[in-house]
Structure formats: structure tokens, C-alpha cells
Image (spheres, helix red, strand yellow):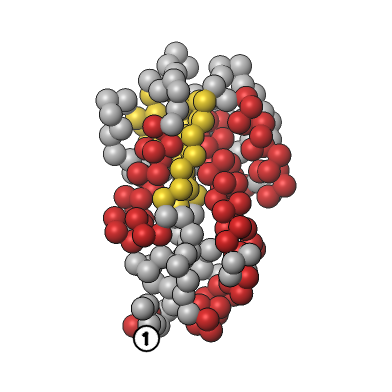
Amino acid sequence: MLELKLHPHLLECGTDEAGRGCLAGPVTAAAIILPDDFTNSTLNDSKQLSEPKRKLLKPLLEDSSLTYGVTHIFMEEIDQINILNASILAMQRAIEQLSPQPEHIIVDGNKFKPYHNIPHTCVIKGDSKYLSIAGASVLAKTYRDEFMEKIHLEFPMYNWKKNKGYPTKEHREAIRKYGITKYHRKSFRLLPEQLTLNLK
């Protein structure tokens, strides 16, 4: 059973990102503050949940939360500042949308940068330990998946509605065959033989 909060007496948000290892599309982060009486037996790390379960949880989380925020950071900015900085910035921008602002932040993973003067704690595998981080992981994943399904219509040959931009064999084969799109991250190693890939 996941814990609600790390600090029960504080107004605490959980934050997480999705899409960090993708070759295409944004990195997406969410932050959420759940009420003290929130319980849900289904909610877990988004990677452990099926897509239908995530889609059911999304409106439930949005309706139950005290406040939530979701942010995309797009390819150009990822290429400029690198994916780690983009992931942290996405989480900070999601927290910025929260009203009220939290008194404490719990972050999935082991990397974060101070956000204003609000104390934070990094929690390895936090999305399988705390409900608010799990909630943020579900929101980040569902919003990012929706974006990838939308751009799939523009470039169906990459099958983003299925692979969501991750480096599957099928996605890499499509890059080899059709080249890259405006949605690909040019700073990433898009193909194993990257040296021969024309990125212009």
C-alpha cells in the first residue's frame, strides 16, 4: 500500500516526469497535491498500470486533487539544455502551476534543483512509494501519451500511437527509412549508426 505523504503535517506535492528516454516528442511532468483523506487501491507507478487504468485514474486524480499542474517541454528546449535539465525544469514548471503552492515537494528519482525556497526530498522509485508521486506519474504519462497520439496522425509511419516515441525497433526502422521529423530530439542518438544520419 502506498503512503499518502512523506510529511503528513505539511502541504506536500508529488512530482514526476514521463518521456525522458524517448527519441521524439516532449518530456512531460506533472505535480499534484492530494487531500489528506485521499485513498485509492489502484493507483501505483504509471509503468505498473495498464493504459485503460491510467485513463480511468486521470479524471479521478484531477477531480480529487487540491491542485495539479502539467507541463510539456518540447524538443528544441530539450536539445538546448539536455534531457536531465529539461526533466527537472518540466517538474518545476508543473509545480509553478499549483495553487496553493506546496510547503514541501517530493520528487521521483534522485535529481532535482531547488525550487524557490520550498524544501524538497528526492525519493528513488517514489512513484511506487507515495500516492502523490504516483498520481503525478499517471498524469504526466497520460498527457504525454495524448500528445503523441495526436502527432501520430501527422506522421503515422513512426507509429507513435503505439511506441509513444520510445526507441523501439519499429521506431528506429522508420527513422532509418523516412528520416526525422520536427518532433525528433536532434541531440539524441536516434540510430546506432548516428554518424551517418543526416540531421539537416
Provide the secondary structure element on which disc 1 rests: helix
Task: Point out residue 191 in the picture as x, y percentages from the top left corner.
Answer: 44, 77
- Image height check: is 132 above or below 195? above
Which corner quadrant holds the C terminus? bottom left
Toward the front, the furthest residue is: 154
Task: Point out residue 43 in the picture as x, y percentages from the top left corner.
Answer: 64, 35
Q: Residue at x 66, y 34 (%)?
A: 59
Name the residue type under label 1: Thr
Q: Residue at x 53, y 63 (%)?
A: 165
Task: Point out residue 177 in the picture as x, y percentages from the top left corner.
Answer: 53, 84
Q: Residues within 10 Å of mark 1 (few under 14, many from 20)?
A: few
Toward the bottom, the furthest residue is: 196
- Image height check: is 68 above or below 87? above
User: Is residue 117 in view from this perspective?
Assistant: yes
- Which residue occupies the foreground of this view, 174 or 151? 151
Can you tell which quarter of the image residue 39 is in?
top right
Q: Residue at x 33, y 40 (%)?
A: 112
Q: Which residue is mark 1?
A: 196
Which corner quadrant holds the N terminus? top right
- Which residue occupies the foreground of this view, 81 or 182? 182
Q: Residue at x 57, y 25 (%)?
A: 65
Can you tell which quarter of the image residue 96 is in?
top left
